[in-house]
Image (cartoon, rainbow, N blue to C red):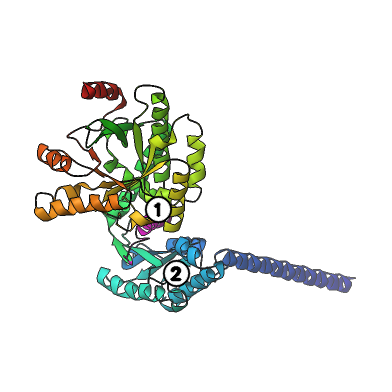
Amino acid sequence: MNSESGISMITNSEILLLFGIVILGFFLYISKIKKANETEKMLDAETGMGNLQYFKYHFKYSLSDDFRYFYHVAYIILDTRYLRTYYDDSSFEEVLKYAASVLSEHTEDGDIPARISENGFAFAFKSIDEEDAKNRFSGIMEKLNSFEGKRVKDNRLVFHSAIYHLGNSDKNCELLLFNLRKNCIRLVDTETQMVFCDVHAMNSIQEENKLTEAILKGLEKNEFKMYLQFIVDNKTKNIVSAEALSRWDRPQKGLVGPGEYIENMENTGIIGKHDLYMFECALRQLEKWKDTELEDLSISCNFTRITLSEEGFIDKLKRISDKYDFDKSKLSIEITEDAIEKDIDVAMENVKRCKELGFRIYLDDLGSGYTSLTNLCDYPIDVVKIDRSILLKTDTDKGKDLFKGIVALAHSLGIKATCEGVETEEQNLFVSGTDCDFIQGWYYSKPLPEEKWEGFLKEYKA
């Protein structure tokens, strides 16, 4: 009886032990699967390197307070738009894999490389100081931009990077990467391969974000106002048109000029919203002037080259213009020199479509910035505006000849000319004695708000 009971007890113990082993094995298997899944979630499928989750994990757990100061973090951006304009998607994927191989090749113990967005890579690497970091990372950037298979025809840089030396308080990975990306985006379309960011450059991004938010709210609440600077015919000295100029009536800060916000708009990609906002202001005014004594006045409206080269620009333009009843020949699209086109072919086609819709085309600031003589052939120009910098050189004989030569060149191409920035009696006398068609400047009209237009026009006419 006792013997049988003992055998029974041993058997039960063995069964419990076996059951325990099975359960333990099951949980170990589940843990292994879970760990494999977690690892897989940290890998980028296209390149095989770590992804954003991977970078954030190692940034948090591998960079301790004692060692953080010995690291620099680089954000590397690939100019996706440019590559996809000239190459197909398979080529783009090939460049991505090449970038991953270069970063892998230059990864040392303790470094953290990762692909964290479609066209962005992050690379945390050890260095003793900025000079050491510069020497090490410049070699990486040179290698990235020398991909023989996809080197672009004009040797354009397709990789740019922004680099920051970590401080002991830099523990917010998301904020760090956001600020670096913003600094890096500024390098796209430039010849600058990499830039080192200091604390001020990183903090300025936060101020820029606040400004961007304020601008967007301002556009929604109609805080931006259209000022007009009137333009005269050189022969009759009658007012014939006006240029629409932007001003921001910013709450708590008062009226601010475009120098305070246009660059932010360009950097953040919202300049198109502003340009179309001002366009609608101009159309609204032309509709008001229709069938009045001011119906012969025209308005020129500034459009940056960034806006003009956006896909879908014409559709947006038409949706706005179709809302108003006005003579389209009284609205001029003024191509500014502020920034270079994202895609010159798209910009040229869009400007051509504007001309076909009945709008006139002005070329602003000839003689400065991105405006060049070749633009006279690139676009269907009606009027060219001679930059003030050319006028300021007319205190010499060569300067006078240059000014007159530009006017003659414009006329030979069937284009009229406007002189900008006339402020003094001497400047007015010189321009009035040339064949220039129109004159613009403070000598005749300051930029004026809506409430002063009518009074000014009546006083001028009198």
Residue at figure coordinates x 30%, y 34% from the top left = 242
Alpha carbon separation for disc pair 1 and 2: 18 Å
Tag 1: amino acid: Leu
Where are the magenta residues, as a range? 172-193
Q: Extreme right residue here?
A: 1
Residue 338 colored in magenta in the image: no
Residue at figure coordinates x 59%, y 67% from the top left = 40
Q: Which mark is residue 175?
A: 1
Tag 2: amino acid: Pro
Crowd tier of the residue under label 2, counting other residues whose Cα lies within 10 Å: few below 14, some 14–19, many 20 or above: many
Q: In this view, does 406 lie to the left or right of 207?
A: left
Task: Establish if 342 lies above or below 441.
Answer: below
Could you tell me which secondary element the residue under label 2 belongs to? strand
Q: Is residue 47 visible?
A: no
- Quarter assignment of residue 234: top left
Q: In this view, does 89 lie to the left or right of 382?
A: right
Which quadrant of the figure contains the N terminus? bottom right
Of residues 192 and 232, the one nearer the viewer is 232
**Residue at image mark 2:** 113
Whichever of callouts 1 and 2 sits on the residue coming sooner in the sequence is 2
Could you tell me which secondary element the residue under label 1 belongs to? helix
**Residue 328 pos. (x, y %):** 44, 36
**Residue 406 pos. (x, y %):** 23, 52
